[in-house]
């Protein structure tokens, strides 16, 4: 069987061969518990600390400011719930946006049931939140602002630096979900002005089930797991050495190859978009035309349901939809809804995301498959 062309890198990435090679010794030879004082434990402890330094290097922080987690969802949970727990005496108000990942939105909804007030800010037609609206939403009880760095659906990059200045001036903790931006664009936590930042391993060619949370030195955050004193006493449990090594190597590679990868992402994305515009008349770009991830392309096909288009191409191209359609009814994603994308366009939304393994010839083939299928559906 010939595998479909993979254009869903924002959902998950393949394992980088260098990552697999780095992990292999910890699957076979180095099995010790990092908390053990003997040789076997010290070998794995060294590996964990090397990985911590590799993650820190990618995002521009100190190794001791990194906590390893089970992924982006846990990192977001720890950041948000941990901050509200640590600062409950100071206030009970959180500011976020309407287009956050469920790993943030659902945490906020959970906290609302615990008595926390949450403001969900709207975004503009490009998926960007207005910094002024963030400032206006601040009250004397605000303890946390959580705004994603880059959107997973449309790729829009938020003005985190400006929000960071605002939060710092007001003495409010700022968290950003950088699951989609880490390894795809240049940034460092100091320039962003964030106190907490989430990373997901499987978005940058490391395994699923591993992530990291940056916690700026001096920031108070509650424990996520109770037990022994691993991860600075903030997350108990024997470390997942195998995948921590994989995440560390992936971050090292991402930092090393970032400029090359950014150029490749942009070239393959633009090749795909320009080709689709030439072949399909009624097509619309979602997200900011300039401030968006270099690998992400969200496009609408007017008069077409995305699920029908995905069904037509599924044996040739793997991609994601921006609307869920069942029994003839289509429901736009919360992101497209917040951006006020008209339903006649939104229900035909595809998210196409390229990666460092994507080739120009694959783009050409995918372009032909998608455009031909779209034209056939329109013809009926």
Image (cartoon, rainbow, N blue to C red):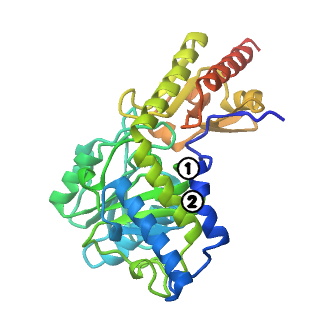
> 219 and 184: which one is in front?
184
Residue at 41% over, 41% down: 258
Question: Considering the image in quadrants, where does the N terminus appear?
Answer: top right
> Any mark on residue 205, and which?
1
Furthest residue in direction left, as rendered: 169
Disc 1 to disc 2, C-alpha distance? 13 Å
User: Does the image show residue 72?
Assistant: no
Q: Quadrant of residue 89?
A: bottom left
The image shows residue 328, relative to residue 151, as above or below, that is above
Q: Is residue 149 left or right of residue 42?
A: left
Residue 62 visible to an observer of this rendering? yes
The quarter of the picture where the C terminus appears is top right
- Which dot, 1 or 2, sits closer to the camera? 2
* Residue visible at 31% across and 56% down in the picture: 60
Number of numbered callouts drawn: 2
Residue 367, picture quadrant: top right
Q: Contact, CB < 8 Å: mark 1 with mark 2?
A: no
Q: Position of residue 97 (x, y in %)?
A: 39, 49
Write down the residue under mark 2: 22
Circle 1 SS class = loop
Give residue 141's position: percent from left, percent from top. Answer: 25, 67
Numbered circle sitting on residue 276: none
Q: Position of residue 33 (x, y in %)?
A: 56, 82
Q: Which residue is at 56% across, 15% downward?
A: 275
Q: Which residue extends farthest right?
A: 1
Left or right: 362, with 145 as reference point: right
Answer above or below: position of 163 versus 139.
Answer: above
């Amino acid at each position: 069987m010939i595998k479909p062309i993979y254009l869903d890198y924002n959902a998950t990435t393949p394992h980088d061969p260098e990552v697999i090679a780095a992990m292999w010794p910890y699957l076979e030879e180095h099995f010790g518990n990092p908390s053990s004082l003997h040789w076997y434990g010290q070998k794995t402890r060294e590996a964990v600390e090397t990985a911590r330094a590799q993650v820190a290097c990618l995002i521009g922080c100190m190794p001791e400011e990194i906590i390893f987690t089970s992924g982006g969802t846990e990192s977001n949970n720890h950041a948000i719930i941990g901050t509200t727990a640590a600062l409950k005496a100071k206030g009970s108000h959180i500011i976020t946006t309407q287009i956050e990942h469920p790993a943030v939105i659902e945490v906020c909804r959970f906290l609302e049931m615990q008595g926390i007030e949450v403001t969900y800010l709207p975004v503009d037609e490009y998926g960007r939140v207005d910094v002024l609206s963030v400032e206006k939403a601040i009250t004397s009880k605000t303890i946390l602002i959580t705004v994603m760095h880059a959107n997973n659906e449309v790729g829009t990059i938020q003005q985190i630096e400006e929000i960071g200045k605002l939060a710092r001036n007001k003495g409010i903790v700022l968290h950003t979900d950088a699951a989609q931006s880490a390894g795809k664009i240049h940034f460092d936590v100091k320039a962003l002005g964030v106190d907490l930042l989430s990373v997901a391993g499987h978005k940058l060619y490391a395994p699923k089930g591993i992530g990291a949370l940056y916690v700026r030195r001096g920031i108070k955050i509650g424990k996520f797991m109770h037990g022994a004193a691993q991860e600075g006493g903030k997350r108990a449990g024997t470390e997942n050495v195998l995948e921590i090594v994989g995440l560390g190597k992936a971050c090292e590679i991402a930092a090393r190859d970032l400029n090359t990868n950014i150029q490749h992402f942009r070239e393959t994305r633009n090749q795909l978009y320009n080709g689709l515009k030439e072949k399909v008349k009624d097509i619309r770009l979602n997200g900011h035309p300039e401030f968006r991830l270099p690998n992400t392309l969200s496009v609408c096909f007017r008069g077409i349901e995305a699920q029908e288009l995905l069904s037509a191409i599924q044996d040739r191209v793997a991609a994601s939809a921006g609307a869920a359609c069942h029994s003839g009814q289509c429901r736009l994603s919360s992101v497209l809804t917040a951006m006020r994308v008209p339903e006649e366009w939104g229900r035909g939304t595809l998210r196409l995301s390229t990666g460092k393994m994507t080739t120009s010839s694959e783009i050409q083939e995918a372009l032909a498959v998608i455009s031909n299928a779209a034209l056939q559906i329109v013809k009926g």
